[in-house]
Image: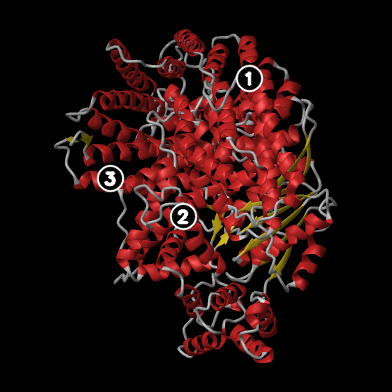
């Protein structure tokens, strides 16, 4: 008997599926015909030959093909007897060959295509199990044919669309297939797309973006749902409606919000519904970026701040929507993302009562009554199982008492139900355990200030019952999940490497893993699986269960450490490394976004453990020992957060990474730099520590003007010293030495930048020249140095010359930098920095009209890349407005300056820049005759400027307040200068300093800005 015959016994009647089988066979024949038209004979062109042909390229997608095709082959064997279409695997290989050959030079796009095949085919081996387990069920065979036809439809669409216009249509293919697949498997997130086969513009229909399946066992809470209806509907009417649903952990806030979302989906067909994870700013930023893509406001946009801006703009323009901000911890951060418009509905869930001040309505969520808890438990146990649990009335009474023992916590009751379902404990036994532990007077600490709902009963005992019968390997998974973000834990993170170095569970395939581990955890309601039949599904675990597991782990130090190390290894395996030369890398952002929440949770677990060592005089916890891998993971996360402008989270993880790598460096020696052909711990930790400090410097440099300059200078000096140390290490390989030298040249450039910030222009020129000389030395050695690197140093030298009033020399530098960057053909977001500085230089050389033309183009380019609220865009908006004002075009200046005052701007823009813009607006208003508002804004700007100067010159400012005289010459010079110069003095140089320096005399090299010393 063949494998296929054994898989599908002869008694499986497929007569009823004859029509579907014929449809599938017709699709196969159509696919063969298309492949034949393209001269692809799949049986003759086997995959091995194709892989051998392209192996030298080694793109990422090539590594995936073997797994994909293995799964395809299993699928084809399983489905073959249903549709009587043998040789399917050859056809699929033919499709892959067509797609891969057609896009051989577009590896980035190919990654996305193969990802689709990868995701689809990983589910195929599961079908084999279904066919065997339900061989006598024609409905299953019918469903298998549906899935098979969908797969063939995808292949047909892929071939036809790629043949027509591959570059423009690939996104459409993924959207269409995604919608089709999610609808078939029980959707959790649907973007409904309508569009004919012609290439007309796609129309956006209703969006339902909810990442969780509906809870089929949801019951009760009718009064809460009715209150939500009254408070939040209809969404499109004025004013905007908002409500906070708050209560202690485990009260079912998320489940109520989920049920409300699905009910709204059924009742209001035109209502857009967005689920927004809101635990921290990183999650909020990602969610809004996702919304931008869903509403098609994110096309060709890589800048995260602009994605957020576009999503917010769409929400303000479209009236019918409901947003659910789940698990808000910080109301201030939530307010930053709340759309400022007079329509829409917002539901907030939170454990914290302080969140109620962010919304117009609130609903405090009470615990279930004993009777409600009993009904809740009964709903979670099947009728079949109830038959074996004794008298219904007695069982109901046991459940009533049980609900009272756990104070009506729905989450805990679900865990108890899972224990009973899995036969880990009887209902009476569960009640006895709870009553005994209750008499001990234990108290659950996870109440977050909700004294009204504080659990007086020992919830840990209920969790212990739920965990008691979980296999050891299942407990291992739960422990790891306790250290990750509670939601969106990718299933493939835990089961992808079953045969590799992380295979600590001992499994060889994902199907067995799902059956023995995943199913057991879901059955006991310990985790949620977004869709267990699919490889791209996600786990969720409740935060209260996470806290309980973490507390248990802390009592077993070796298990605590082992779990932490495993969690770090699993996330680090897929989290992108930071680029060697710290250049923007937008292509990695999707992978960063997928895992950044888990990195931040690992960081919080480590920091919480670390803090406990200092808070207790006699700490009971054994500290977690961090690894270099953890420090490297945090550094990569910090770099991503730096790129997307999430400064607070970035600084926090980088401080930890810097501390860990510093401890590794100081505990090792610089001797034996090379060990076994590999860099030593000292060399690696030195490089990592320096990188963390360099990124921290970048955050300060972006976020602050002169108020943060001294702190930034200290970091820049530290980076130079450490880079020089690394570059001088003996035994570095040629590639490592090259990398070290390039990074050292960049460090010289960065300290030059900081000196320009601090108006130390002559000293800045020395460092910039050192950077340029080192790059030229490397190039003279035959090493490749991108033109961008030279343009960067030369451009900054132009700024240094401007600060010394060497305007003609500055113009030469600027023209050279623009020439180099254009010759380089670079198209990254940094190009406008060079043209912006060229515009400033033209203006200070007495060519305002040329400067205006340049700045207008810079503004448009930056708006396209960064959006209206991007800090770079607002710098350009200020520059255009200033030049208009200088030319006497006050109306144009007034319109343009408004671009500096964007509401709800998410990108970083130094406060000093905003104050300078306010000052310019006051001058414009007065020029237009509005003396009242002009005077008001003028006084506000001067007050804010005085605050900055008190931070920059604290001693001198205090002396002036006391004696009206100061010893600091720079401060005295500055206070004697005109107002415009003082406002230019405090902003970062890259924002443009337009003071003409006429009082100092053009070209005298003295400059009009007094230097700010490293120490006052």
Q: Residue at x 61, y 86 (%)?
A: 389
The crowd level at tag 2 (other Cα within 10 Å; few <14, some 14-19, many 20+) is some
Q: Secondary structure at mark 3?
A: helix
Instruction: Look at the image and tell me whether residue 1005 can be seen.
Output: yes
> Is 700 on the left-hand or right-hand side of 330?
left
Q: Is residue 349 above or below residue 804?
A: below
Residue underneath mark 2:
601
> Is 215 on the left-hand or right-hand side of 603?
right
Residue 755: name its quadrant: top left
Which of these two is toward me, 357 or 424?
424
Q: Nearer the viewer, mark 3 or mark 2?
A: 2
Kindly identify which numbered label has been placed on residue 201: none
Rendering coords of residue 730 (x, y %):
17, 29
Dots 1, 2 in contact, CB < 8 A = no
Q: Nearer the viewer, mark 3 or mark 1?
A: 1
Compute the Cα span from label 1 to label 2.
Answer: 50 Å
Rendering coords of residue 261 (x, y %):
73, 58
Rendering coords of residue 614 (x, y %):
33, 64
Kindly identify which numbered label has been placed on residue 662: 3
Mark nearer the N terminus (1 vs 2): 1
Mark nearer the N terminus (3 vs 2): 2
Q: Secondary structure at mark 2?
A: helix
Which of these two is toward me, 239 or 786?
786
Residue underneath mark 1:
38
Compute the Cα span from label 3 to label 1.
Answer: 59 Å
Q: Residue at x 54, y 53 (%)?
A: 6
Which of these two is toward me, 139 or 751?
139
The crowd level at tag 3 (other Cα within 10 Å; few <14, some 14-19, many 20+) is some
Residue 29: name its quadrant: top right
Residue at the farthest left position: 671
Q: Secondary structure at mark 1?
A: loop
Dots 3, 1 in contact, CB < 8 A = no
């Amino acid at each position: 008997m063949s494998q296929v015959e054994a898989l599908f016994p002869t008694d499986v009647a497929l007569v009823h599926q004859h029509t579907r089988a014929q449809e599938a066979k017709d699709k196969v024949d159509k696919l063969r015909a298309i492949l034949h038209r393209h001269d692809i004979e799949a049986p003759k062109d086997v995959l091995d030959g194709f892989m051998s042909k392209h192996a030298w390229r080694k793109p990422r997608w090539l590594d995936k093909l073997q797994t994909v095709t293995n799964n395809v082959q299993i699928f084809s064997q399983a489905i073959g007897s249903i549709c009587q279409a043998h040789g399917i695997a050859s056809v699929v290989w033919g499709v892959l060959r067509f797609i891969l050959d057609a896009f051989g030079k577009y590896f980035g796009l190919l990654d996305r295509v193969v990802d689709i095949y990868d995701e689809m085919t990983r589910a195929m081996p599961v079908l084999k199990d279904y066919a065997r387990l339900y061989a006598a069920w024609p409905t299953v065979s019918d469903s298998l044919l549906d899935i098979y036809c969908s797969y063939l439809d995808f292949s047909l669409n892929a071939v036809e669309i790629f043949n027509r216009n591959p570059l423009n249509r690939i996104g459409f293919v993924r959207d269409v297939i995604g919608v089709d697949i999610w609808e078939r498997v029980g959707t959790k997130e649907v973007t409904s797309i309508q569009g004919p086969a012609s290439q007309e513009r796609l129309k956006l229909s209703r969006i339902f973006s909810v990442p969780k399946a509906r809870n089929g066992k949801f019951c009760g809470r009718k009064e809460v749902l009715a209150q939500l209806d009254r408070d939040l509907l209809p969404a499109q009417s004025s004013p905007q409606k908002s409500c906070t649903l708050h209560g202690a952990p485990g009260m079912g806030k998320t489940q109520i919000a989920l049920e409300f979302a699905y009910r709204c989906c059924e009742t209001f067909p035109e209502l857009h519904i967005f689920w927004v994870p809101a635990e921290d700013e990183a999650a909020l930023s990602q969610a809004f970026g996702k919304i931008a893509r869903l509403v098609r406001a994110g096309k060709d946009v890589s800048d995260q701040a602009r994605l957020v801006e576009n999503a917010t703009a769409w929400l303000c323009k479209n009236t019918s929507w409901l947003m659910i901000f789940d698990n808000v911890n910080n109301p201030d951060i939530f307010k930053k993302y709340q759309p400022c418009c007079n329509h829409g509905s917002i539901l907030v869930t939170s454990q914290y009562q302080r969140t109620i001040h962010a919304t117009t309505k609130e609903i405090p969520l009470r615990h279930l009554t004993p009777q409600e808890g009993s009904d809740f438990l009964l709903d979670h146990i099947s009728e079949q199982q109830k038959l074996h649990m004794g008298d219904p009335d007695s069982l109901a009474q046991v459940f009533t008492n049980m609900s009272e023992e756990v104070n009506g916590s729905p989450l805990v009751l679900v865990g108890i139900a899972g224990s009973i379902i899995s036969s880990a404990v009887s209902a009476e036994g569960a009640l006895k355990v709870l009553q005994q532990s209750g008499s001990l007077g234990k108290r659950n600490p996870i109440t977050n200030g909700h004294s009204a709902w504080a659990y007086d009963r020992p919830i840990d005992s209920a969790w212990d019952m739920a965990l008691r019968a979980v296999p050891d390997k299942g407990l291992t998974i739960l422990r790891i999940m306790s250290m990750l973000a509670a939601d969106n834990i990718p299933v493939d993170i835990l089961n992808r490497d079953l045969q590799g170095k992380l295979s600590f569970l001992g499994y060889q395939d994902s199907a067995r893993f799902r059956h023995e581990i995943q199913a057991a955890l879901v059955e006991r309601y310990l985790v949620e699986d977004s869709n267990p039949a699919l490889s791209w599904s996600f786990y969720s675990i409740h935060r209260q269960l996470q806290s309980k597991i973490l507390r248990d782990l802390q009592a077993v130090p070796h298990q605590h450490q082992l779990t932490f190390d495993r969690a770090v290894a699993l996330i680090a395996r897929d989290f992108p490394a930071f680029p060697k030369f710290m250049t923007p890398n937008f292509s990695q952002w999707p992978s960063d976004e997928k895992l950044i929440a888990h990195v931040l949770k690992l960081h919080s677990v480590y920091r919480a453990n670390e803090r406990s060592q200092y808070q207790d005089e006699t700490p009971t916890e054994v500290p977690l020992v961090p690894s270099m891998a953890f420090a490297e993971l945090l550094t990569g996360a910090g770099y991503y957060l730096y790129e997307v402008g999430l400064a607070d989270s970035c600084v926090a993880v980088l401080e930890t990474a810097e501390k860990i790598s510093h401890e590794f460096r100081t505990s090792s020696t610089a001797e034996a730099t090379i060990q076994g052909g590999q860099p030593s711990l000292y060399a690696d930790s030195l490089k990592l520590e320096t990188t963390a400090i360099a990124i921290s410097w970048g955050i300060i440099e972006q976020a602050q003007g002169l108020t943060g300059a001294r702190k930034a200078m200290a970091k820049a000096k530290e980076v130079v010293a450490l880079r020089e140390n690394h570059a001088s290490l003996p035994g570095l390989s040629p590639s490592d030495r090259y990398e070290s030298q390039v990074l050292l040249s960049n460090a010289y450039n960065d300290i030059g930048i900081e000196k320009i910030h601090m108006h130390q222009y002559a000293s800045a020129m020395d460092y910039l020249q050192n950077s340029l000389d080192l790059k030229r030395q490397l190039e003279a050695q035959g090493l490749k140095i991108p033109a961008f690197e030279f343009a960067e140093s030369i451009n900054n030298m132009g700024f240094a010359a401007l600060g010394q009033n060497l305007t003609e020399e500055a113009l030469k530098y600027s023209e050279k930098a623009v020439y180099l960057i254009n010759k380089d053909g670079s198209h990254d977001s940094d190009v406008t920095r060079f043209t912006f500085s060229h515009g400033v230089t033209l203006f200070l050389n007495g060519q305002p009209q040329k400067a205006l033309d340049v700045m207008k183009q810079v503004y448009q380019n930056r708006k396209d890349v960064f959006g209206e609220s991007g800090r770079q865009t607002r710098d350009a908006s200020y520059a255009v407005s200033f030049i208009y004002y200088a030319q006497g075009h006050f109306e144009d200046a007034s319109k343009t300056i408004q671009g500096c005052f964007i509401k709800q701007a998410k990108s970083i823009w130094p406060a000093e820049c905003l104050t300078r813009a306010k000052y310019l607006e006051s001058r414009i208003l007065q020029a237009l005759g509005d003396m009242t508002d002009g005077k008001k804004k003028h006084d506000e700007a001067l007050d804010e400027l005085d605050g900055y100067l008190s931070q920059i010159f604290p001693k001198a400012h205090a002396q002036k307040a006391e004696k009206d005289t100061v010893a600091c010459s720079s401060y005295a010079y500055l206070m004697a200068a005109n107002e415009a110069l003082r406002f230019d003095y405090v902003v970062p140089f890259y924002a443009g300093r337009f003071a003409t320096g006429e009082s100092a005399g053009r070209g005298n090299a003295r400059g009009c800005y007094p230097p700010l010393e490293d120490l006052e």
